[in-house]
Amino acid sequence: MRQPITRLALGAAGLFATAFAALAQVNPTANSVQEGALMEALQSGQSVTGRISIPDSGASVLIDPSGRTWASLHTGTLQWITIIAVLGMLALLVAFYLYRGRVRVEAGFSGRKILRFNIIDRFAHWLLATTFIILALTGLNLILGRALLLPLIGEGAFGTLSAWGKIAHNYLAWPFMAALIMVFVLWVAHNIPNRLDLEWIKQAGGLLQKNVHPPARKFNAGQKIIFWSVIIGGALLSWTGIMLLFPGEAGPGTGWQFYQVIHAVVSAVMVAIILAHIYIGSLGMEGAFDAMGNGEVDENWAREHHSLWVEEKLGRDAAKSPPPRARATPAE
Amino acid sequence: MARMKFLCDADRCIECNACVTACKNEHEVPWGINRRRVVTINDGLPGERSVSMACMHCTDAPCAAVCPVACFYTTDDAVVLHNKDTCIGCGYCSYACPFGAPQYPQMANFGTRGKMDKCTYCSGGPEADLSTAEYQKYGANRLAEGKLPLCAEMCSTKALLAGDGDIIAEIYRERVVTRGYGSGAWGWRTAYGDTVNV
């Protein structure tokens, strides 16, 4: 629109007057912007952007068709991934329970307790666990609540619940990240994979048969898998979560949508893994919960699942205790 | 019932921003929120065009699809509205919207998003028509008074058209035929899946 005015002004200056007058006669459609042409020229993830006079540079994006792509991904694929992950793991756990039943302490409880996790270990684990559960439930609510919960409790109650859920999700993310760092620092030394883990995996940890107890130190291969899943998955969730909390950091274009998809997929996988972890740490295995509860496990439980750790621990305690009764130090 | 749409004739828009101002004034929209804005494409270059853009009230609105609390609804006039009592300010709609329509007041703790605000096509919200509660949350309800959106009604060059989609498409088509050119119905393909063929 400004072009002809500029031309007229120049024309009034008398320079090339006739040439500009001729130009002004040209059909403006010859060089006008066609929306269709702009849209066709877009690469994926690009948007039609111009200049804007209000002080909000983000508003200069006129049309960003990628929003619809993310919308269909969010309402279709991501929901199915979540449903399959949760229900699939629950089905696996039910099948495992039907096949194996509760994993018992085969030698029976000895009545002697060994300290497995001190107060700092337990604090970190409980902080990580409680924040994860709340984050998982409030997160699942964002993906599935509309389909599952909304019809049950109505729009008003569901809106209020989800609003609190959003606040909880945003703020509990920080203690979750703190606990994740604590757990990493406290336990990483015990979670370096070694040759024992191969043997443990070969025997499926003795989970599928009775009276099979592959040797393990403080953490067996199964626990190491959980540990590294939690550390890697938790780090991914933390990183993408921070990007979602501070969308300015995610960058323009489809940055936010990209992080949201990663966040949702990793969450679904983590929920499935943690479901299995919670099951085997509580209902699924006799004596296992004590490690998280008061930190002291039964000696016979420990001998069955962490034989080398028990040897090491009792050896060290014996060495420390005042009556120096001769006891061979177990080989490392 | 009509199928309400917006159509901005970019060959007429002079980027005066009167639609933006009218909207802010009519609905007493707070600071930092613009339900409507004017974007200039190819600024300063040959073929520069300005387009006034707000919520296009899409067919199969993606905002409504992604909303985790289902706070959106479509009126009989095909206007996409939302319920601020249900909205949790998660921001999903703004990432699904192709037009940057959803706006958020920064009012929660640490400046996080408050409840979403967007163009209502001057037709309020779920509260009773023309009630005080409706005005405070959503602004004026001109449709209930038998009027069209103010941005289009007061556009000085009649670039911005509002009304039944078929009627405004016909007006635009006549203009294009008469003057011999037109840059197209901006946003229509993305919002409604079709465009105005001339």
Image (cartoon, coloured by chain):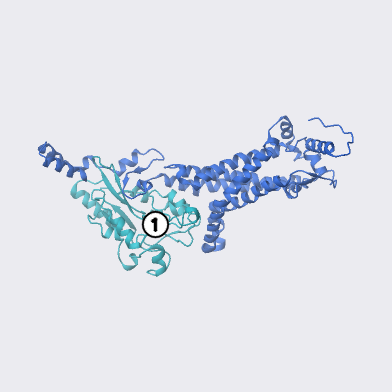
The quarter of the displayed image where residue A182 is located: top right
- In this rendered view, identify the residue nearer to me: A320 or B48: A320
Question: How many numbered marks appear?
Answer: 1
Is the C terminus of chain A in the top left, top right, bottom left or bottom right quadrant? top right
Could you tell me which residue is drawn at 54 percent across and 55 percent down? A167
Where residue A100 sits: x, y (%)?
76, 45
Q: Which amino acid does label 1 sit on?
A: Lys
Q: How crowded is mark 1: few (under 14 residues within 10 Å), some or many (20 or more)?
A: many
- In this rendered view, identify the residue nearer to me: B70 or A97: B70
Q: Please state if B111 lies on the left or on the right of B148 as rendered.
A: right
- In this rendered view, identify the residue nearer to me: B71 or A189: A189
Where residue A181 sits: x, y (%)?
62, 42
Residue A25 shows in this picture: no
Kindly identify which residue carries mark 1: B118
SS label for mark 1: loop
Could you tell me which residue is drawn at 15 percent across and 39 percent down? A23
Residue A236 shows in this picture: yes
Of the chain colours in the picture, the one used for chain A is blue
Q: Tell me which chain appears cyan.
A: B
Q: Mark 1 lies on which chain?
A: B
Q: Please state if A329 lies on the left or on the right of B129 as rendered.
A: right
Could you tell me which residue is drawn at 65 percent across and 39 percent down? A185
Q: Please state if B160 lies on the left or on the right of B71 as rendered.
A: left
Where residue A198 sits: x, y (%)?
71, 31
- In this rendered view, identify the residue nearer to me: B145 or B151: B151
